[in-house]
Image: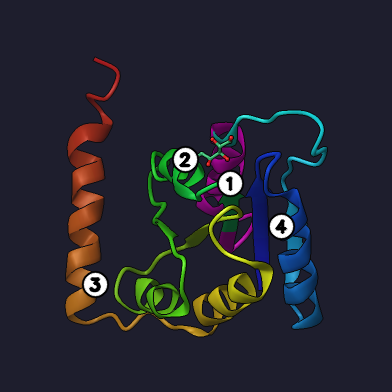
Amino acid sequence: MKVGFGCDHVAIELKNILMEHLKEKGYECVDYGTYDPNVKANYPEYGLKVAEAVMRGEVEKGVLICGTGIGISLAANKVPGIRAAVCSEPYSARLTVEHNNANIIAMGARVVGSELAKMIVDEFFDAKFQGGRHEMRVNMISDIEKKYGAEWHE
Ligand code: RB5
């Protein structure tokens, strides 16, 4: 599976650790930045890059990291078809795939340590969407996007 990674300046070290971890497990990792910890980066830019890569099918799933994981996931979730979930423990990481069909996992580099972050991504990538009643609910999320998409800039 091809996975897109994005982060801001506070999360580069964790991003690199997780990319190495997933590469060792056979995943192809694409790094959309940022790259320099000494240059402050704005998290919406990297949330958007990875979300657009997922939306276009350049990568199948994404991993986003900022200080809390919140800002970067909020930005990614503005892209149609993106379901980015902030997770700080493995249980939610599994369930957000099984029930919400999440296509991006977000984490906070100031919230989780690297070993916990590895467990979180492992659960996320091992999990499978269960469909059924969950599919109808995920479709309801898409309906909200459709309802507001056209009028968003008015
Ligand atoms: C950067 O200081 C911080 O605001 C950012 O990494 C993130 O936590 C925002 O949600």
Q: Amino acid at mark 3?
A: Glu
Give the mark nearer the N terminus: 2 vs 4.
4
CB atoms at circles 2 and 1 under 8 Å apart? yes
Quickly name the residue at label 2. 71
Task: Characterize the local packing of mark 4: few (<14), some (14-19) or many (20 or more) Cα atoms within 10 angstroms.
Answer: many
CB atoms at circles 3 and 1 under 8 Å apart? no
Find the magenta span and give its range: 44-62
> For this view, does 112 lie left or right of residue 134?
right
> For this view, does 147 lie left or right of residue 73?
left
Give the mark nearer the N terminus: 2 vs 3.
2
Q: Amino acid at mark 4?
A: Lys
Quickly name the residue at label 3. 135
CB atoms at circles 1 and 4 under 8 Å apart? no
- Relative to the observer, which residue lies in front, 99 or 120? 120
Residue 79 lies, in percent from the top left, at 42, 41
Give the mark nearer the N terminus: 1 vs 4.
4
CB atoms at circles 4 and 3 under 8 Å apart? no
Residue 125 lies, in percent from the top left, at 55, 78
Quickly name the residue at label 4. 15
How far is mark 2 from mark 3, CA to CA?
A: 27 Å
Quickly name the residue at label 1. 66
> Which quarter holds ligand 1?
top right
- Relative to the observer, which residue lies in front, 108 or 150? 108
- The residue lying at 45 percent from left, 38 percent from top is 75
Question: Would you say residue 89 sits in the magenta stretch?
Answer: no
Task: Characterize the local packing of mark 1: few (<14), some (14-19) or many (20 or more) Cα atoms within 10 angstroms.
Answer: many
Q: Is mark 2 within 8 Å of ligand 1?
A: yes
> For this view, does 46 lie left or right of residue 104?
right
The secondary structure type at the circle numbered 4 is: helix
User: How many numbered marks, from 0 up?
Assistant: 4
How far is mark 2 from mark 1, CA to CA?
A: 7 Å
